Structure formats: C-alpha cells, structure tokens
Amino acid sequence: MACAGLTGCIGIDLPDSAPYLADCMPPAAQAGEPAPQALFFVSTDLPDCREGNLRFAGFRHTAVTHGLSDQISELGKGGSTRAFTEDAWLAMLRQRLSAGNNDGRLLVYIHGYNNAFEEVLDAGWLTSRGWFSGVPVVVIRWPSRASATDYIFDEGSINWSQEQIDRTMMQLAQMDSRITLVAHSMGSRAAIAAVRRIDSARPDLSHKVERVVLASPDVDRSMALRDGGLLDAMQADGRQVLVYTSRRDVPLALSRDAHGYARLGSSNCRFDVDPDARNLPKGELCHLAPERDGLAMVDTSEVASGTWFRHSDYLDSCAVRADFTAFLREENSFPLRQRVERDGKIGYVIDAELARQIAGCGD
C-alpha cells in the first residue's frame, strides 16, 4: 500500500509512561514570581523528563500539566520549564494579570498539528512579541506527534483534548481578564469549540473573550462561512474575529485533499461547496464573506512566507506580522490591506507593493 500526504502507514506503538515520568519533579505547590518572559502553559501531553528537563513526548496523558517556561529556542536561549499544581499556577497567573498597567490583557495561544513543545513555546513567544509589555501568555499544549505524516493521530488527539481546552478557557474567562485568543491551523477547531462552549454555558462571560485570531485555520470553510455558521456564532458580544487565509498554503491543500472540501485558511476556489465559486476564473479568491462588523477575512497569498509549507504567514511573513501586530495593539488602521468585493461579499488582501512601501517588507 502506498503512503503519502498527511498520513503514514504504520500505527504508533504507545509507550510505557513510567520511564518518561520517572525523573520528573513533583509539581510545585508554592506560587513563585515568574520571570518576565516566562510563558504559562497547560498540557494534556505526556511529560518527558528522560533528559533531565521537562519536555513532552507527543502522547496523550491522563493527568494535566500546568507549568511555566522561559525556554525560547528560537532565540537560542535555554531557560527552564517547571510544573506547578493547578492552584499555584492559577495564583501566579492572577498575580501577573493584576500587575503593572496590563489592564487585564491576556493572550492565549493554541497550536496546530505537527508541532513539538519547543516550537509551540517559540510560537507563543513570537505571537506576543509585538504586543504590550507585560501581557501574560498562556500556551495550550495538546499531544502533537510533531510529524508531517501523523495528521490523523494529531486530529484524534486534539479532539481528545477538547474537554480540557474548554475547561482551561472557562477558567481564564472567569478571571479579571480581557482575552485575545490566537489559534493556528488545526488549533482553530479547538479554539472555536471552546469559545462556543463559553457562549452557550456561560454567556455572562462571553465578553471576556474579546478577540479571536484564526491563522491558517484547518476548518471546513463552508461550515465557517455559511449563514449561521461557525464565524457567525463566534461574534457574540461584539467579539472581533480575524482570519488569515492563503491560496499558497501547502498543508491546507493536503488537508483539503484528505477532507474533500476547502478549508477556511485557504482562499482557493477550486474545492468550494458552491459550484459557481468552483467555476470562477483562476486567481479569484474565495475567502470572502458577507460584511459583518468585527470580522476581517485577510488573504496573505501575495506576501506568503518563503518556506515551502507557507503555513505560518502570521509569524513568518514580514507584512503579515505587521498587520497582525496592528490587530494585537488594537489599532483602527490596517494600511497593508486592500479591500476585495464580489457578489455582495468582502474580504481583504495584504498588498505586496504596499508592504514594501509602508512596512519595508520585501517578502
């Protein structure tokens, strides 16, 4: 049997967890003072302490880990990662939220498929870098195998983790917080589900999740954009929703092949549910949506990152980073965007020439 694309042929043997956990320190019950750059994290992944430091193995674990890490490999910085009891972790987060002039801002990051823990920490740090100084960051880690061919494994594991993701988001919404939720790729499914759980179970807390960014979302596009669909449901209490899409995103093209229909993070028209959209001339974009206050559908194809995957433009592309930073900083002007209209629907495109002129971006 031939194997290609997002899935492998051989099943994964599940490990005995004992050797992974044997050298792990027990969670600290005493709240401390986190380092200024430390990221808070919650993980449903199997802890791995075989090399002396806390990492995660990419397998599901029945116990949830709450921790802090100032390990940032993107900067070549070592740092440390430590687990805490849930109570101590929550106490430290509340302390950080109330400190300085943060005004309750909190950034939550949910990663996508094919991500090791170190990559998730880097993405969480990079996501917050252009925002206000001192904003605490909570990274939600679920068990990704960190392999391009383990898509089905990752898809099952993020679904398995949804209950804990919902619980964590509910805890954060119950704090004195103003949440910006950023989700990448497959993580967008978990983000949407968690926000909808808050909206249905605790509508009094809906306003706490002020803004949501779905970057390259691996979500069914028709389910998201149709009337009364996922994006309509996400816009409770004036919530702002920003979606980054691209027709050049390779993993989303493979996901489209696996699922049969277009993904929300793709602006390609070829696999749209609507036959009229499929028959549009080549080069037309299908990320457009009815105009709604607080919703921005932004195509990044013209300024896609130079990597082969082109799946993380919001971090890898200079122009998209500039647009993303403007959103995080709650600016009202997005000068790199060009408005696109067709058949009563609108969207935006990050313009490459404007990016060169205004932001000095050459990518």
Image (tube, grey):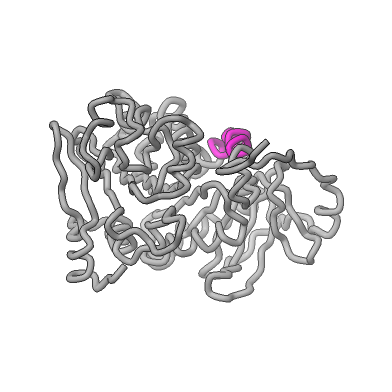
Is residue 278 rendered to the left or right of residue 208? left
**What's the magenta region?**
155-167
Q: Is residue 158 magenta?
A: yes
Q: Residue, x 17% and y 60% (percent of image)?
A: 335
Image quarter of residue 9: top right
Q: Is residue 59 visible?
A: yes
Q: Residue at x 43, y 53 (%)?
A: 311
Taking the magenta stretch, the answer to whether it contains residue 294 is no
Task: Please state, as top left, top right, bottom left or bottom right, where the C terminus lies in the image.
Answer: bottom left
Q: Closer to the camera, 195 or 176? A: 195
Identify the residue at image location x=29%, y=63%: 319
The residue nearer to you, when weighing 39 against 351, is 351
**Quarter of the figure with the N terminus:** top right
In this orientation, which residue lies closer to the viewer: 195 or 110?
110
**Residue 213 in the image: x percent, y percent?**
37, 47
Determine the image quadrant of residue 118: bottom right
Q: How many marks?
A: 0
Residue 70, placed above or below residue 328: below
What's the magenta bit mostly, secondary-structure-wise?
helix
Relative image position of residue 26 (x, y in whole percent)? 78, 55
Instruction: Tell me, yes or no, if residue 90 can be seen here.
Output: no
When asked about the image quadrant of residue 230, the answer is top left
Q: Position of residue 105 (x, y in %)?
A: 39, 55
43 shown above or below 302: above
Task: Tell me where residue 275 appears, x and y as whole percent.
Answer: 27, 25
In the drawing, does residue 168 fall left or right of residue 193?
A: right
Residue shown at 55% from the left, 41% from the top: 168
Give above or below for 20 relative to 217: below
